[in-house]
Amino acid sequence: MHKASCLYKRHKGGILIEFTFSIPICIILLFFVNDHYRIYELKHKLKSSAYLAASMVQQLTNNRSYKRLTTKDLARITFASCLNLFHTNTMFNPWPFGIFFAIDYDWLKKLDGNNYQWNETWATTQQGTSPDTMYTGTSNTKVTLDRLITVYPALKSVQSELVCYNEGEEKLIISCYFRPKNFNKSKIGLFLINLVFGNKDFGYHLVITPKPGLFPIEK
């Protein structure tokens, strides 16, 4: 009886040791699952922002006699489309989430052959404190699709959607990004995994056919 009792105590001690070693592994797994879900959620919010922006681009000037959009219009669209993550003015300085929001609006209109008119417009919360003071800009040039992809390799994933077959045909690329500003992964609920910025921007690209007369953008 005494021998059986000793064997039981040894077995019980082994279970306790195994449990002690398993606790940190379980915690790491929980953090890992949390981070993957959080990153998935952020990517989904970028996708939602792109579709929200596309809807507003198409509808904003419906009640205007003059339909062309301005940089101020796109600043307000950008601000409104990121409210699914940011609240009040948290997308602006001091950027409490460690990230800011930006949208690039790239409008293409086929001229002839492989030549396109390219109107590049951007709006970002990197500067300013409201939609009226956001950093915006616009430029116009002539480009080929190959040249555009060379300048912006991230657009390669939607290159086939950019091809226009008829002269005068238009396409609009809406590219939504989260970019770092005083970034710390804990500010957005990450424990182990870092977001990848820089050349591999954390972004989503959506290609639509805009209504006629909205572009090119006016300052």
Image (cartoon, rainbow, N blue to C red):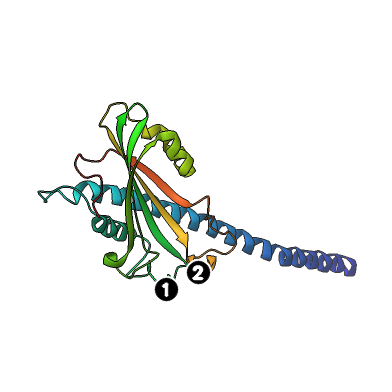
Which quadrant holds the N terminus?
bottom right
Q: Is residue 23 above or below residue 62?
A: below
Asked whether 112 or 214 is in front, the reply is: 112
Place residue 29 in its image quadrant: bottom right
Is 160 situated left or right of 61 in this image? Answer: right
- Quadrant position of residue 141: top left
Mark toward the start of the polypeptide (2 vs 1): 1
x then y, percent, for residue 12: 78, 66
Residue 14 quadrant:
bottom right
SS of the residue under disc 1 = loop
Outermost residue, bottom side: 94
Residue 16, given in percent of the width and then of the height, sits at: 75, 67
Per the image, the residue denoted by label 2 is: 182
Location of the C terminus by quadrant is bottom left
- Considering only vertical position in the picture, is 13 above or below 217? below
Does the CB distance between marks 2 and 1 fall below 8 Å? Answer: yes
Identified by mark 1, the residue type is Pro
Measured from the top left, where is residue 34 in percent x and y? 53, 59
Say which residue appears at 34% left-offset and 59% top-offset.
Answer: 82
Q: Residue at x 39, y 60 (%)?
A: 101
Task: Report the disc number at residue 141.
Answer: none
Residue 144 picture location, percent across and down: 40, 34
On the question of residue 178 being in view, the answer is: yes
Is residue 13 or residue 107 the one in the foreground?
Answer: 107
- The amino acid marked with disc number 2 is Asn
Query: In terms of secondary structure, where does tag 2 sit?
Result: loop
* Residue sitting farthest toward the right: 3
Q: Residue at x 38, y 57 (%)?
A: 102
**Residue 83 appearing in the image:** no
Q: Residue at x 28, y 64 (%)?
A: 131
Return the residue at label 1.
94
